[in-house]
Image (cartoon, rainbow, N blue to C red):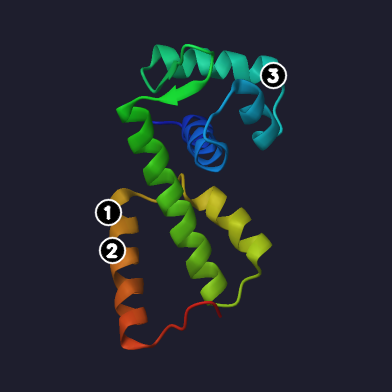
């Protein structure tokens, strides 16, 4: 099944909010993504129907194992791409923005090879962290 950019963005946001605050509600997602509450409500309904999230006893959003896997993979791509761009001198702001767009379009195969190549370059000392 094809996972949409929107689905990845929502799941990634939920994961990040839970990591930061310990709990996530729809309003937190709306605030983080700068979307309206009604739009987020509709999206949460779809994420629930697709088995990516469930509501906790007090209305909090909880990632299912499948939702967590997608969110974690998306966040990993985002963090890696941000690190790569900043290491070659791109400003943090632009690196974050570019990573946010690319994290959805790069294939798993390309991402895995890219990450392996970059790790090898870092190990050789060709790339300096925190440029």
Instruction: Point out residue 71 in the picture as x, y percentages from the top left corner.
Output: 42, 38
Give the residue at mark 2: 113
Nearest the eye: 48 or 22? 22
Asked if marks 2 and 1 touch (Cβ < 8 Å), the reply is: yes
Give the residue at mark 1: 109
- Could you give the CA–CA distance between mark 2 and mark 3, rounded to whole angstroms? 39 Å
Above or below 105: residue 1: above
> What's the mark number on residue 37?
3
Q: Is residue 108 left or right of residue 100?
A: left
What quarter of the picture does the N terminus occupy? top left
Where residue 88 sits, quadrant-wise, is bottom right
Q: Is residue 122 left or right of residue 98?
A: left
Secondary structure state at the residue bearing disc 1: helix
- Could you give the CA–CA distance between mark 3 and mark 1, rounded to whole angstroms? 36 Å
Instruction: Point out residue 67 in the picture as x, y percentages from the top left corner.
Output: 37, 29
Foreground mark, 3 or 1?
3
Asked if marks 2 and 3 touch (Cβ < 8 Å), the reply is: no
Above or below 6: residue 95: below
Nearest the eye: 21 or 102? 21
Residue at coordinates 53% horizontally, 55% vertically from top-left? 99
Secondary structure state at the residue bearing disc 3: helix
Q: Earlier in the sequence, mark 2 or mark 3?
A: 3
């Amino acid at each position: 099944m094809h996972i949409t950019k929107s689905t990845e963005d929502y799941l990634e946001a939920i994961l990040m909010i839970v990591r930061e605050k310990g709990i996530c509600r729809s309003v937190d997602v709306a605030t983080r993504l700068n979307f309206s509450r009604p739009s987020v409500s509709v999206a949460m309904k779809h994420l629930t129907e697709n088995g990516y999230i469930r509501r906790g006893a007090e209305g909090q959003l909880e990632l299912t194992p499948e939702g967590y896997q997608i969110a974690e993979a998306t966040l990993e791509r985002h963090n890696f791409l941000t690190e790569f761009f900043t290491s070659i001198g791109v400003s943090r702001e632009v690196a974050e923005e570019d990573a946010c767009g690319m994290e959805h379009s790069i294939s798993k195969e390309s991402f895995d090879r890219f990450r392996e190549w970059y790790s090898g370059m870092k190990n050789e000392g060709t790339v300096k962290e925190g440029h």
